[in-house]
Structure formats: C-alpha cells, structure tokens
Amino acid sequence: MRTTTMGRDGPVVGRLGLGAMGLSYRYAPGLVDRTKAVSLVQEAVDLGVNLLETADAYADGENERLIGEAIRGRRDEVVLCTGGGLLGNPDGVLRPAGGPQALRDAVDESLRRLHVDHIDLYLLRRIDPAVPLTESWGALAEQVWAGKIRMLGLPVVTVEQAREAEAVHEAAAIGAEVSLFTRCGLDDVVPYAVERRIALLAGAPLGRGLLTGAYSRTEDLAPDDWRRTQPRFAPRAIRHNYALTQAVAQVAARHEATPAQVALAWLLRLGDHVVPVPGTRASYHLAENLGGDRIRLTEQDMTDLEFLPYPAGSAEV
C-alpha cells in the first residue's frame, strides 16, 4: 500500500485507514459480532492497514474497548486515532461537549478503554458553539504537553478557525466526511491543509455504503440500521442515489474494479494528504477496499466523476 506522512512531522501511515464506527455502532448494531469485529481489525493490520480510527462517542465507548482488545500486544504496529467533544443523549442524538474539563476527562477515559499510555492522533469531533475554540483546543494541547496525545486533529472548520486553533497548537489532521457524494464546504480548507501539510482524514468515503452500489431500496437496510433515519437513504432519495452509482460502475468497468474501489481511488487521486478511512465488518469488503489503492484513474475518469450529479438528500444529520 502507498503511504504518506501524517502532518508535518508525524508517523508514516498507509493511504487507506480503517474506520471502526460500524463495527459496533449505528449500522445495525443488533447484528454486531464482537469476536468477528476484533478479528477483522487484526486482519486489517496484518494486511498493512496501520491507521485505526475510533471515537469515545461510538457505542458509548464500546468501540474504543473493541479496538483496545484488537491491538493488545500490537500497539507499535498501529497509528491510533480516537476523538472526543461529543456526548450521546439517551435518544442517540450527539451533542457538542467541548468544555476544557470535559475534554481532559474524555482523554483519560479513552486511554483507559483503549489500554494504552498515549493516543497518536486525537480528533476534536465537533466545535462546541458554547465554548471558544481556543479553550477546547488549548485543553487538548495540554494533553499533548503531558504526553497523553501525540498529535491533534480538527473537525470540519473554516480557514479562519483553523488558523485560530493553530495559533495555540499545530494541527496534524482535519477529520471530515468526504466522498464523491459529499464534496461541499472544503474548497477553502483543502488548499490550507495542503499548504500546512495537514492530513485530510476522509470519513464515510463510500457515502455510508451508497457508493458501493449495494443499496437500491431503504428495505435493503436492517430494521435497526441508523441509516434508515438519514435523508439520503429515504425511499425516493435512495433510488435516485443508486442510479448515480451506475455512472461510477461504468468507470469501474474500465479498470475491472468495483464502484467502491473507484470511489476510494478518486479520493486518493486528490492528493497525498488525503487518507480515506472506510469501514466494514466483512473480510471480503476489507480486501475490496484495499484494492482501491491499485486503481489509477485517468483524466477522462476524473472528468466523468467530477460531473457526477449531486445526490438526493443531505449528508449525515
């Protein structure tokens, strides 16, 4: 797998990471098999995936516990990314929690659940409108100076917010939902990230499964799958969005690839600073996703994909 450097002086990571959210959270949690989930993470590391991304808000910390179990005895083989700044309500809605003490406590709890003495990359998951960004970022910077965190990452921000944060402590990454289906809001931030050698961690790079072409009806999702509540998976929207994946499939056919592989190859083509972090629960999808690194899209491919119509429905709400 091709590699890149995380941030200006950070570790070398594979161009494709593993997003762990779906292993225990939101995507049909009733179908979770913990033993298989741990095995899949270990398989990913065996295949050369060294960037693992989780968060304290995923399944109320259970996702971190799962990752901690999977990397036991293999800590030096992975670049561990987790994050905080969000709290879940009983109804499952996440709310910002960017107070300095809340973040200090969150870091300590993540270290405990992961069974590690430091976190390689800690992402502030959301900017809390009730707390100045410099206060939230400053509290996390203290954790870097204390040796609990190695690098810090920002959520979706404006250039002005990024500069404000970096006046306190440099950012090694920006974590954002980015895919062929979610491109808005980053036009100004991407050049800033390139200039500052900040990695862009592309979350949900397969459109939460839409870009695989596997979902043409809402009924294709399990009854307890969180995506049933999302606008892009509503009955009328999902039919429209499935039709869009057929254009991606046409590009894939030129390379004897799958739509998912082309969607990841498109992100990789955007620049060495872009690191997609697709998630999966299945070994065959893990192998499929890693195959996206072998695809070399042509200029014609890129043109065809750039003019892909916008999907129906908003991104995550």
Image (cartoon, rainbow, N blue to C red):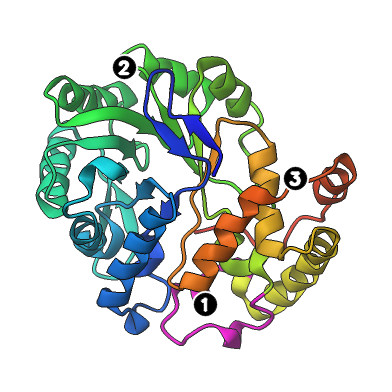
Q: Say which label, 1 or 2, has the lower sequence index.
A: 2
Mark 2 secondary-structure assignment: loop
Q: What numbered label is drawn on residue 169?
A: 2
Query: Is residue 8 or residue 254 the one in the foreground?
Result: 254
Whether residue 268 is visible to the viewer of this picture, yes or no, is yes
Q: Say which label, 3 or 2, has the lower sequence index.
A: 2
Residue 172 lies in quadrant: top left
Report, in whole angstroms, how far the alpha carbon at label 3 lies from the one at label 1. 34 Å
Image location (x, y in percent) of residue 192: 57, 20
Q: What kind of residue is marked 1?
A: Arg
Image location (x, y in percent) of residue 149: 21, 31
Which residue does the image show at 73% across and 60% down from the upper left?
311
* Disc 3 to disc 2: CB gap under 8 Å: no
Give the residue number, with chain letter if any, for mark 3.
296
Query: As displayed, is residue 39 above or below residue 201?
Result: below
Say whether residue 163 is left or right of residue 310.
Answer: left
Query: Is residue 288 or residue 114 the one in the foreground?
Result: 288
Instruction: Tell me if mark 1 has few (under 14), some (14-19) or many (20+) residues whose alpha carbon lies within 10 angstroms of its own.
Output: some
Q: What kind of residue is marked 3?
A: Arg
Q: What kind of residue is marked 2?
A: His
Of badges 3 and 2, the one in the foreground is 3
Which residue does the image show at 68% across and 74% down from the upper left?
238
Give yes or no for residue 230 being in the magenta stretch: yes
Residue lying farthest front? 46
Say whether residue 123 is left or right of residue 310.
Answer: left
Say whether residue 153 is left or right of residue 180.
Answer: left
Residue 213 lies in quadrant: bottom right
Report, in whole angstroms, how far the alpha carbon at label 3 lies from the one at label 2. 36 Å
Mark 1 secondary-structure assignment: helix
Give the residue number, with chain letter if any, for mark 1.
228
